[in-house]
Image: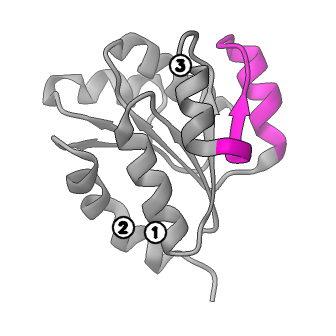
Amino acid sequence: MSKMLIVSTSYDGKEYFQRARSIGLEVYALDCFEGHHRQLKDWYGSAMLEVAGRRADVVKLLTPHQFDVAVIHEDDDYVRSALIAQSLRDCGIPLVLVVTSDASRVRIYRRTGAHRVIVANSASEAWNCFEQWLVANQPA
């Protein structure tokens, strides 16, 4: 595991980004949300991939990158988060993780493309759930 994509409009995404870099992952952030470009650009700089939110555009941009894992931190619009999970699965990303604070949404995310759904109240709690797996699957 060496290449990660972060999808989040909140500060939680920045925390994942920093933690992933600290363990040696190549990390990018996806900006496909209207109204968040300036903040995401400030946080991620040249590591930000920008695309319109249409599924075909997301797939076209991301498929050549061959990400090993994508982490979607649910935002205020859980339907949008589910649609992103579907698009990322269509890109062939082998592990699409969705982080939600609402356990009742696990089935929705699984049905729309998430390989795993983590129920957590913060980015720190979520990271603790999947950090060991990320480290264990890093190339030697």
Q: Which residue is mark 3?
A: 36
Q: For the residues labelled 2 and 1, say whether their Cβ atoms are less than 8 Å apart.
A: yes
N-term mark: 1 or 3: 3
Q: For the residues labelled 3 and 2, say whether their Cβ atoms are less than 8 Å apart.
A: no
**Dot 2, crowdedness within 10 Å: few (<14), some or many (≥20)?**
some
What SS does tag 2 mark?
Answer: helix
Residue type beneath disc 3: His
Q: Which residue is mark 2?
A: 131
Residue 83 in sight from this viewpoint = yes
The residue positioned 35% from the left and 73% from the top of the image is: 132
Q: Which residue is mark 1?
A: 134
Mark pair 2, 1: CA separation? 5 Å
For residue 13, above or below residue 111 = below
What SS does tag 3 mark?
Answer: loop
The residue positioned 42% from the left and 53% from the top of the image is: 16
**Magenta range:** 45-64
N-term mark: 3 or 2: 3
The residue positioned 64% from the left and 67% from the top of the image is: 2
Q: Residue 59: within the magenta?
A: yes
